[in-house]
Image (cartoon, helix red, strand yellow):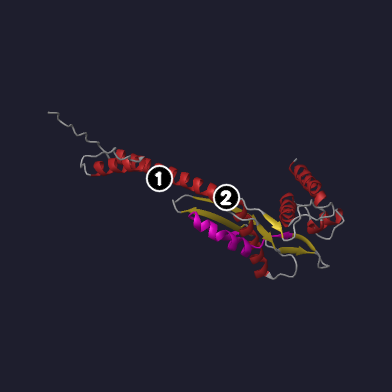
Amino acid sequence: MSTAVKTIEHAPAPVTSESTAIIQVIERAAMNPNVDIDKMERLLQMQERILARNAKAEYDADFALMQQELPVIVERGGIKDRNGNTQSKYALWEDINEAIKPVLAKYGFGISFRTGKIDGQISVTAVLSHRAGHREETTLELPTDASGSKNAVQSVGSSTSYGKRYTAGALLNLTSRGEDDDGKAAGASQTITEDQAIYLRELIEAVGADERRFCARGKVERLEDIRADQFDAAVRLLKSKGDRNNG
């Protein structure tokens, strides 16, 4: 008579994460009245590092997936000259916000802003937060936008809106295009972008130059009228002035 041997298959032991293992060690240590306080603090610090590392890993993984779905933003905003001709275009913040919010939510992200004033300049900080707890941020400081016929409140609002566009674009690696962009390269007659004009204005202030005289030297009425192919030369000129002042 043969005896059937029944084989009992044991389920594999559950995989314990590094963070869970540390928590179990902490719980056991907390129940011990003779536990070394310094050791407990080191365990807690280790747990915090593990949680932060895991949160960063989740952030990076979801960010990589999200990047594939972030849309190209249509540029509907424009800077016009005195004749009403559009000299440069940019994406409006309301368009950017509307386009990115569904994608951010899908992958557990949210974006918020802190604004303030530092040494008379508008400060805008964008914070990209993830559901796992990790966050990244970037800050831009810029002068109030006094161009056109803006009053003081409008100038601050314009600079804040620009700061939101710029910092959100930097954190999310956003791209934009003109509504009728046919992919052709701009001609030499195109003027510098809004970002380039702001950069030149900040550089002028940094090196102690006079914006009016600088424009007069370039035979333009304002920085926004400088041709795109002259931007690099304008930057070199201002930086050379800064070097001479510091020499």
Residue furthest to the left in view is: 1
Within 10 Å of disc 2 (Cα), the crowding (few <14, some 14-19, many 20+) is some
| Residue 165 figure quarter | bottom right
Q: Residue at x 24, y 42 (%)?
A: 28
Of the image marks 2 and 1, the number of the one nearer the N terminus: 1
Q: Is residue 104 magenta?
A: yes
Give the Cα distance between marks 2 and 1: 24 Å
Q: Amino acid at mark 2?
A: Gln
Q: Amino acid at mark 1?
A: Leu
Could you tell me residue 147's position as x and y percent? Answer: 74, 65
Which quadrant holds the N terminus? Answer: top left
**Relative height, residue 107 to residue 56 (above, below):** below
Q: List the residue tagged with mark 2.
A: 67
Region in magenta: 89-117
Residues under numbered marks 2 and 1 in contact, where contact means CB atoms less than 8 Å apart: no
Could you tell me residue 62's position as x and y percent? Answer: 50, 49
Residue furthest to the front in view is: 1
Residue 51: mark in rendering: 1
Q: Secondary structure at mark 1?
A: helix
Q: Residue at x 41, y 42 (%)?
A: 49
Residue 148 seen in the current view: yes
